[in-house]
Amino acid sequence: MLSGPGFVVVLDGATAPAELDSGCRHSVAWLVGRLGGQLVVPLLGGSAAPLADLLADAIAAVMAEHADSCDLANPDSPSSTVSIVRASADQVDHLVLADSPVVLRSPDQRMTVVADDRIDLLPEYTFGAVRRLRNQPGGFWVASTEPKAAYEAVAGTTDRADVEVVAMLTDGASRYAERYGHTWEDLVEVLDTAGPQELIDRVRSYDTNAAEGTFRGKRHDDASAVLWRLARRRPTP
């Protein structure tokens, strides 16, 4: 997670199974660090460019850093989810690429969930299917070695007055609602009243007690959660 004046970025790297050759000498942590660094520079500079443009530029810049040493055509190259929220005086911009959702709560408690669930809609979840459908039309998109993936993200803009609280989560934390039956209102309430660690502790308890084979994917996953309370916009005289 990276933050600065008026923005938050959440990245969740995807670790390929050890038996797969990623074609890259670098770790997922390296990719996440470089990608975050490239995103933060324009955001700290106050760029008003579309978030998809910033992400596409960041992916291209990271590719250039290891194009001479790694096989960037390998579909198992390290990858990451990306969620960005940027708030200005008048609006809140959001971008979600892969399964790290954003939740916007309005002053009257309405919830808007911004999620990219395409990986959950794959017909099968074998290594081969994931490799074949990663960053492909009809499949799912992540930040890796295709700058055009940025333009497949779920992105939009909301009036600043309509956003009071922003929650940003990796899938290891969002499963509190997506997997374990709680509402998004419940999830944001836990974050707002008890904090991210309480949410993660509750998820870990559910993970531990879930029957083997109940859900697809890993029993435990990296879990991060951010709650951002936006200051009320002062009315223009």
Image (tube, rainbow, N blue to C red):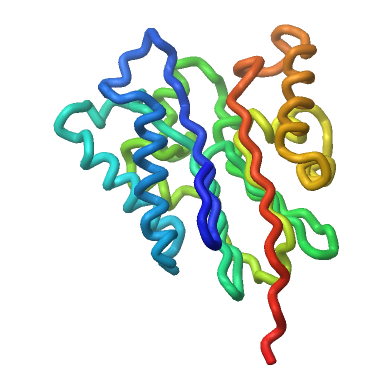
Number of marks in the rendered image: 0
Relative horizontal placement of residue 113, taking residue 69 as reference (left or right): right
Image quadrant assignment for residue 42 = bottom left
Give percent across and percent down for residue 71. 22, 26
Relative horizontal placement of residue 192, taking residue 124 as reference (left or right): right
Of 143 and 65, the residue lying toward us: 65
- The quadrant in which the C terminus is found is bottom right
Residue found at x 68% / y 62%: 230
Give percent across and percent down for residue 128. 43, 17
Of 220 and 141, the residue lying toward us: 220
Residue found at x 32% / y 20%: 22
Give percent across and percent down for residue 12. 51, 34
Furthest residue in direction bottom, as rendered:
237
Residue found at x 35% / y 31%: 30
User: In this rendering, is residue 153 above or below 137?
Assistant: below
User: In this rendering, is residue 50 above or below 18?
Assistant: below
User: In this rendering, is residue 80 above or below 82?
Assistant: above
Image quadrant assignment for residue 177 = top right
Residue found at x 37% / y 46%: 37
Give percent across and percent down for residue 88. 56, 70
Relative horizontal placement of residue 90, taking residue 70 as reference (left or right): right
